Image (spheres, grey):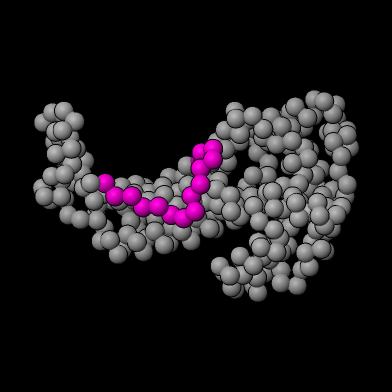
Amino acid sequence: MTPSTLNNSRRRLIDTLSNTKLFRSYSSAFEQMTSLHLTLEAATDGEEMPQALTTYSIAGVAETRVPVKLGKSLVAVLHTGGVRTAPATAENFTPVASALIESGRGAAEIRAERDAFSKLPRMELARYEAAIELLKSFACHLGESTHRLLFATTEHEPEPVRLAKAYIMQHLTEPLSLETVSSNVNVSPFHFCKVFKRGTGMTFTDYVNHVRVEKARRMLLRPGARITDVAYDVGFQSLSHFNRSFRRIVSESPTEYRARLKSARPGLLAAA
């Protein structure tokens, strides 16, 4: 996948996630509760973010970035706006004023920064930390929804792509070849390859594997589901191919994925 295709794919993902009812409802509730604006940003190439990161400015203004992950892979970042964890006193602003003076800023600029500082939301540190814990839980929920959203059909897609997606879903457990699917959407294999990758950001083979792995992830939530049975039920022709594809896409094996969910959310597998 070229960098431009990858960037376009990420932009589509962020746009899709940002416009879901899940994100809009949660971000609105979070803002009502904390007065903090919540944004969703695309992860950059090669970025690693094992856990949430809170940074403090010299004036004690806190901002937090929380990773949204698909398995162990970083796909997006939730970012809070700045919040004061201390009163907007002249003493607390002094380090900022000193830094601005040293950088050659004038009195008008310093006053503007002072005004902006005083208008920031104010939260006690313990309350802010509690809000971030809620945000971490939401990031986990959003990550679990990400994979499904990647494969949702959208109106802007070319008709061959929409038809191909529908055909793939209907015949997922069967052997699926490029020739068969392109024939069923009435375009040549060569043209289908180009339009499908342009529309989805993936090759046909990668897309089919991703859809099968997503279905497998849901099936693995059932405690009684055997990994071997799941592999064949979603259309993989061998267990080794399933395991390789699952690890490549989710960044962990099916066994590790199930164990992680059981450890992180003990009631999830029992309720599935």
Name the residue located 84 percent from the left edge and 48 percent from the top edge: 171
Quadrant of the frame with the N terminus: top right
Q: Which residues are magenta?
A: 42-57
3 over 82 or under it: above or below = above
Q: Position of residue 248 (x, y in %)?
A: 69, 48
Q: Position of residue 87 (x, y in %)?
A: 17, 54
Q: Quadrant of residue 15?
A: top right
168 over 105 or under it: above or below = below
223 over 156 or under it: above or below = below
Viewer-proximal residue, 239 or 87?
Answer: 239
Q: Total marks drawn?
A: 0
Q: Position of residue 111 (x, y in %)?
A: 13, 36
Name the residue located 10 percent from the left edge and 47 percent from the top edge: 90
Name the residue located 81 percent from the left edge and 63 percent from the top edge: 228
Tell me if 41 is positioned left or right of 232 in this view: left
Based on the picture, tell me whether residue 216 belongs to the magenta stretch.
no
Viewer-proximal residue, 35 or 197?
Answer: 197
Majority secondary structure of the magenta segment?
A: loop
Quadrant of the frame with the C terminus: bottom right
Based on the picture, tell me whether residue 44 belongs to the magenta stretch.
yes
The answer to whether residue 95 of the structure is visible from this angle is: yes
Name the residue located 47 percent from the left edge and 42 percent from the top edge: 41
Q: Position of residue 110 (x, y in %)?
A: 15, 35
Tell me if 12 is positioned left or right of 183 in this view: left
Tell me if 185 is positioned left or right of 10 in this view: right
Tell me if 113 is positioned left or right of 209 in this view: left
The answer to whether residue 145 of the structure is visible from this angle is: no
